[in-house]
Amino acid sequence: MPVEFLGIAATNNGSETEARTGAAFDKDYTLRLARAHEEHGWDRVLFAYGSGSPDPAPAAAYIASRLDTLKILLAHRPNVSYPTFAAKTFATLDQISEGRLTVHFITGGSDHEQGREGDTLTKDERYGRTREYIEIVKKIWTTREPFDHEGEHYRFHDFVSDVFPVQQPRPGVSFGGSSPAALAAGGAEADIYCLWGEPLAKTAEQIEAVHAAARAAGRTTPPRIQVAFRPIIAPTEELAWEKAHRTVAAIKERRANGDPVLSRRHRTSAPENTGSQRLIAIAESGERFDRALWTPTAAATGGAGNSNALVGTPETVAQALLDYYDLGVDILSARGYALLDDAIDFGRYVIPLVRAEVAKRDAEGRARGPQTLAEAG
């Protein structure tokens, strides 16, 4: 099966290890970073969402209008706009990008962060709202006749959009979460299910949970699986591990100094969302797993988001990614700590190795022909 690579479309050069040097929306840097991804073999970039961050939709439109092939994953929180409005925004962006849009729906794992924009629902209630929201957006994208909706969270009448996506029947829907409520919603509605990087055995369990949720929702085809990591690469193993320890030291120093931007994003209290709780539990059980997975980066950020690292030479990290590919992961998300330089290095030295090996395996599979059910186990 083909493999895709997802990078990050940051609007400034700040990261967990480095304070930004310009405005929150640095237009020149945003374009420079996205162009680096397009020129170095990445398939798409994520425009993330934060309560006080620049609005990702116009930032994505800005990039889409200036680059030719790079695809867009747009993060969106259902609490910030009505689904009729959002569906039109997404369709317009798909038109601007000429069919390069996927939408990542974020339910929100922190009551405090959600409350910053007036969202007072509980986490499980938010997942119910997200599922209803996605259902509405999909219908708006694909329905040419006016319709009414009477749901638990949304009610409207006689709505039909006058703008539709380029992609037919519609753009893709991306989703993430590890709780039972998340699995139920994403298993039913997601085209892509996003996981944070965990040890191989735990990732296999997560994938099976997603497949089970999809079957429970009556689906015959499960979502594609995406897994996210923070790669730390260098020409030798020794240099890579030295870089890894410098990275954690820099994260800890910024947190100890009370950096205001980092403090708002990485709360020091115990996380509410299941995904972050899993990352912390894994970090507490050990630092190194499988070929290259390293957990101190997750521990240093309190399990904030995509935070487990893959450490080693390009060859080591590529082989580690292929281990996840062998589990059924066909979208590999990676984001370094020096955003621009790491995107270039990963694109130059890791992506070609993974693509070449995937092509080789696919060719060998075609040569063998289809397996019987007994042969497949």
Image (spheres, helix red, strand yellow):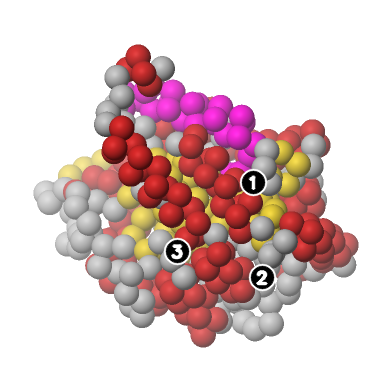
Question: Of marks 3 and 1, which one's residue comes earlier in the chain?
Answer: 3
Residue 294 is situated, as x and y percent measured from the top left of the image, at 73, 47
The residue positioned 74% from the left and 57% from the top of the image is 237
Q: Amino acid at mark 3?
A: Trp
Would you say the residues marked 1 and 2 are in contact, meaning their CB atoms lie under 8 Å apart? no
How many C-alpha atoms fall within 10 Å of the one at disc 2: few (<14), some, or many (≥20)? some
The residue beneath circle 1 is: 110
181 vs 237: above or below: above
Question: Of marks 3 and 2, which one's residue comes earlier in the chain?
Answer: 3
Which numbered dot is residue 42? 3
97 vs 129: above or below: below
Question: Disc 1 on helix, strand or loop?
Answer: loop
The residue beneath circle 2 is: 338
How many C-alpha atoms fall within 10 Å of the one at disc 3: few (<14), some, or many (≥20)? many
Residue 289 is situated, as x and y percent measured from the top left of the image, at 71, 38
Q: Which residues are magenta?
A: 192-219
